[in-house]
Amino acid sequence: MVVGRRGRRPAGSGVPLTFEVIAETLRERIRSGGLRPGDALPTQAVLMREFGASSLTVQKAMVLLKQEGWAVSRPGKGAFVAHHDHADDAGDADDLDGPEATAPATGTAARVEALERALAEAAQQIADLRGRIEALESGSGEGGR
């Protein structure tokens, strides 16, 4: 598979970026049962070696998986496969008596939690930027006189 480099997608091409390839590979491992709910996901170092990717690229893939509800973080322990809603995966739609039967609520809750975290981080970044802008404006006002 051809993977785009440097975070830029050639215009008009369907070439996935490395972080997208990493995320899709992990999704497929989860769908196929190679990784099950509660299992630890490969570490950043393992994924960096496996895909020849930078730490930032692996982090972007993990953020994507967490935002989509495929993974959850446990501080100090790592990232784990979430109890994801697999109802949209044809192979799993009729398995309603296993532990994944409760997955829709947990998968949705994980998505909401990920979105809330992302929103809180964005709000903090905005507040930080406003503070920096105010500091620059008050500093430039004095220096310009």
Image: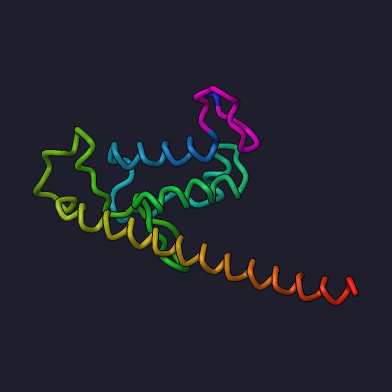
Decide which of 4, 73 is in the foreground and name it. Answer: 4
Q: Which residues are magenta?
A: 3-16
Reply yes or no: does residue 11 show up in magenta: yes
The percent position of residue 16, horizontal first and vertical second, equals 51, 31
- Residue depicted at x 63% and y 69%: 130
Asked if residue 79 is positioned above or below residue 14 in the image, the reply reads below
The percent position of residue 77, horizontal first and vertical second, equals 44, 64
101 sits to left or right of 68: left
Counting every numbered tag in the picture gives 0
- Residue depicted at x 22% and y 39%: 88
Q: Quadrant of the C terminus?
A: bottom right
131 sits to left or right of 138: left
Q: Which of the 4 quarters of the picture holds residue 75?
A: bottom left
- Residue depicted at x 48% and y 39%: 22
Q: Which of the 4 quarters of the picture holds residue 53?
A: top right
Asked if residue 6 is positioned above or below residue 35 in the image, the reply reads above
Decide which of 79, 102 is in the foreground and name it. Answer: 102
